[in-house]
Image: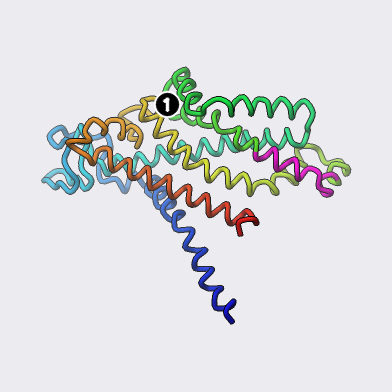
Amino acid sequence: MSAVAASPARRKRQLWRWWPLAIVAAVALAAILAPWLAPYDPNAQNLAGRLKPPGTVSRSFHYWLGSDELGRDLLSRIIHGARVSLIVAFASVILSGTVGTTLGMIAGYRRGWIEVAVMRVVDVFLSIPAVLLAIITVAVLGPSLVNVVLVLALTRWPRYARVAYSQTLSIATMPYVRLAALMGAGAPRVLFRHLLPNIIGAVSVVATLEFGLMVLFEAGLSFLGLGVQPPTASWGAMLSTGRNYVATAWWVATLPGLCLFVLVLAVNLTGDAVRDRLDPRFR
């Protein structure tokens, strides 16, 4: 009886663990609907209304979250800035995950010189600080949205390669994998039909945890002026300009920073929930 009574409570606790996913979904929905949700053009300047505190209401503007140094509506810029963060994070995770997982599976399945070459390249990339590599690469390629995605994918693919490689080593020796190879299945079929479905859970956990890190990396590059360039709204760039007005207009830097903190925290907690769900050791 006690076990039966405890079952609904346990399910309720498990469902409660997914509340950060609701925050991530809300931010993603706001980013998708930014042109309709934002009350004003995020790049529209109004020098007469610069550095207005949150809640300022006038005949022409309603600054619900205040305005920045150029009189631009902070709420509109925060909503549009979420689009940049999510687009960069999602694209870089997909690109780095695809490249890293493919190379890791090939190295773990083919072995030999391919394994040595791929894993030594992984070791080289992991030995270089990711932030330093990203800054140098963006400085060479030039700051833009596409270059930021390429740079973040370039610095993070070894994480997926390591996980895919270790998982492939343990699965490639299974009887059904060897039987498929003996029956004439080619390497691509074995990799993507028999190996990938069995390691996708571990790779998904890495992807969810990396997503929040990609959001922080994008904000850091934009903060340094190496990410998305003005006047495009970006949370990192808003933090960079707002630091000059912390003493006189705290909301310019505090509100974008708070949004960044909440999003990254929600993504990381979602990653923990995904890990607990997919990994039997944490159940």
**Residue 56 appears at what percent x and percent y?**
15, 46
Residue 174 colored in magenta in the image: yes
Q: Nearer the viewer, residue 37 or 109?
A: 109
Task: Identify the residue at horizontal 76%, vertical 41% (top origin).
Answer: 189
Furthest residue toward top: 140
Q: Residue furthest bottom?
A: 1
For residue 20, above or below residue 44: below
Residue 138: give x, y in percent of width and height.
Answer: 46, 22
Residue drawn at x 64%, y 35% as measured from the top left:
161
Q: Please name whichever residue, 87 or 163, is drawn nearer the observer in this view of the structure.
A: 163
Which residue bears the numbered disc 1? 144
**Could you tell me which quadrant the N terminus lies in?**
bottom right
Looking at the image, residue 282 lies above or below residue 211? below
Between 108 and 80, the one nearer to me in the picture: 108
Circle 1 sits in a helix, a strand or a loop, which is it? loop
Quadrant of the rendered image containing residue 125: top right
| Residue 262 pos. (x, y %) | 38, 48
- Residue 95 position within the rendered picture, expressed as x and y whole percent measured from the top left: 56, 35
**Magenta stretch, overall SS:** helix
Q: Amino acid at mark 1?
A: Ser
Start and end of the magenta stretch?
163-178
> Residue at image x 75%, y 44%?
170
